[in-house]
Image: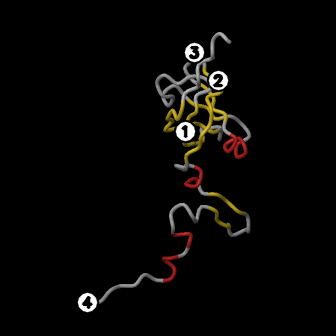
Amino acid sequence: AAYASPSAAAWTSSSTPGFGALSTTNDGSRQISLEALSTTKEYEGSLKSLSEKNGYGFIVCEETWSMYGRDVYVGKEALPEGAKVLDRLRFSVTLNAKQHPKAENVKIVSTAAPPVMGGS
């Protein structure tokens, strides 16, 4: 039986999903494909604020802050039931229409400890 061998061009990094995202255009400028921006990488941060009235909040995360320069918005549809301010959350990021980070696939990692009452 004869086996077809893939051409060398088929094994370039640009044909590998997730690796060829940064490309150089004909005029020499660089561009990032939209595929690179919709990543499934997970981040971990703390729920910084929560609007009881509107149901959305913001997650503070050092790694995403270094990338976007702002906290990550989390809508009420993505916020896990029972999440409270200071809870540790794991999430992935997509960009909204304004190119601001938005949390998706949010899970509670650990809950904030309740304040200790009284003393010795």
Q: Nearer the viewer, residue 114 or 82?
A: 114
Name the residue rendered at 55%, 43% in the picture: 92
Circle 1: residue type: Arg
Residue 23's x, y, as percent?
Answer: 64, 65
Distance Cα–Cα, label 4 vs label 1: 50 Å
The circle drawn on residue 90 is 1
The residue at the far bottom in this view is 1
The disc, 1 or 2, on the residue closer to the chain's N-terminal end is: 2
Residue under label 2, please give it.
Answer: 49
Q: How is the image coloured?
A: secondary structure
Q: Is residue 68 left or right of residue 37?
A: right
In the rendered structure, the answer to whether residue 16 lies left or right of residue 66 reads left
**Separation of disc 4 and disc 3 at Cα?**
67 Å
- Determine the CA span between mark 1 and mark 2: 16 Å
Task: Name the disc covering residue 1, or none.
Answer: 4
Q: In whole angstroms, how far apart are the C-alphas of marks 2 and 3?
A: 10 Å
* Label 1: which secondary element: strand
3 or 1: mark nearer the eye: 1
**Residue drawn 48% across and 77% down?**
10
